[in-house]
Image (spheres, rainbow, N blue to C red):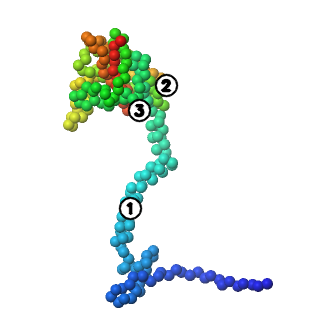
Amino acid sequence: MCWVVRPQHRGTMHKRKQCQAHVSATGTQCKRKAMLGSRYCHLHHSWGKALLGSIVLLLVGAVLRPAAQQIWNNYLPSDDSRILRQLAFERPSFEFYVNGLKVPTNCLVSVPEFGELTTFSNATNFVVHIPESGEVRIAISNTGQRAADHLLIQFYAPALYTNTVVGNSWGPEPGFVGLQEGKLVTNPYWLHWVHAADFTVANGTMFSASPIYMKRSGNEKKLPVIISAASKETREARVAMLLEWE
């Protein structure tokens, strides 16, 4: 039987290599030790490239950090993030009904520009037929995951149309109000009424306002109106439609 005797490995320290730069004046290799992680000593190391690389890394980190943070928050959200997400999910959501007819969500409309009535050409051509009496019954269904507190229903009609009769529950307000050249300005083309709920509207329930009567004037056939709803917990939702007498 043959026995093989292997030499024992002794712990040795890695020595830094000699600088790889060559001195042009003498034609010899630099005798200094190379820096760790570099082929050259501190005198011949390219600090400009190192600085540029550091800047590039910092810029890349600044760009990628928000995305990385977003990914981290999506997969490992904090307790505060989870609570905010839950509150955002568990909030009221409104559907509109006029004379029992559901208004489609594609009728959402933005606030008209000041001095503009709006033709609804970009908003809707949705028509709601109303009886000769002009009765308009507005109902809001809370389809969200949370009750709606301080629910407000708002009704807008053209200011030039004066044949509007509202009940005592509807309070008159200025038309669309917004900032124009740093000042609060009311759009003179719109009339505005508000109906407030006296109770919290639970999710899955419907809240109806008292009727509004749009009395027909002459040969008038169609009239543009805007209805909106808002509560303490959610932003205002707004729909536009055309009322047409039967």
Q: Nearer the viewer, mark 2 or mark 1?
A: 1
CB under 8 Å between discs 2 and 3: no
Compared with 50, 111 (above or below) is: above
Compare marks 1 and 3 and give the one earlier in the sequence: 1
Q: Amino acid at mark 3?
A: Glu
| Image quarter in which the N terminus is found | bottom right
Q: What residue sits 46% from the left and 44% below the top?
A: 81
Compare marks 2 and 1 and give the one earlier in the sequence: 1
Q: Is residue 145 visible?
A: yes
Q: Amino acid at mark 1?
A: Leu
Q: What residue sits 48% from the left and 51% below the top?
A: 72
Q: Nearer the viewer, mark 1 or mark 3?
A: 1
Q: Amino acid at mark 2?
A: Gly
Count of residue discs: 3
Picture coordinates of residue 237, whole percent (x, y): 37, 29
Compared with 203, 128 (above or below) is: above
Picture coordinates of residue 84, whole percent (x, y): 45, 40
Compare marks 2 and 3 and give the one earlier in the sequence: 2
Residue position marked by numbered label 1 in the rendering: 58
**Which disc, if any, is residue 233?**
3
**Which disc, if any, is residue 212?**
none
Mark 2, other Cα within 10 Å: few <14 / some 14–19 / many ≥20: some
**Which disc, if any, is residue 204?**
2
CB under 8 Å between discs 1 and 3: no
Picture coordinates of residue 213, whole percent (x, y): 33, 13
Q: Is residue 62 left or right of residue 115?
A: right
Picture coordinates of residue 167, whole percent (x, y): 33, 14
**C-alpha span from label 2 to label 3:** 16 Å
Judging from the image, what secondary structure is the residue with disc 3 in? loop
Q: Is residue 127 left or right of residue 7?
A: left
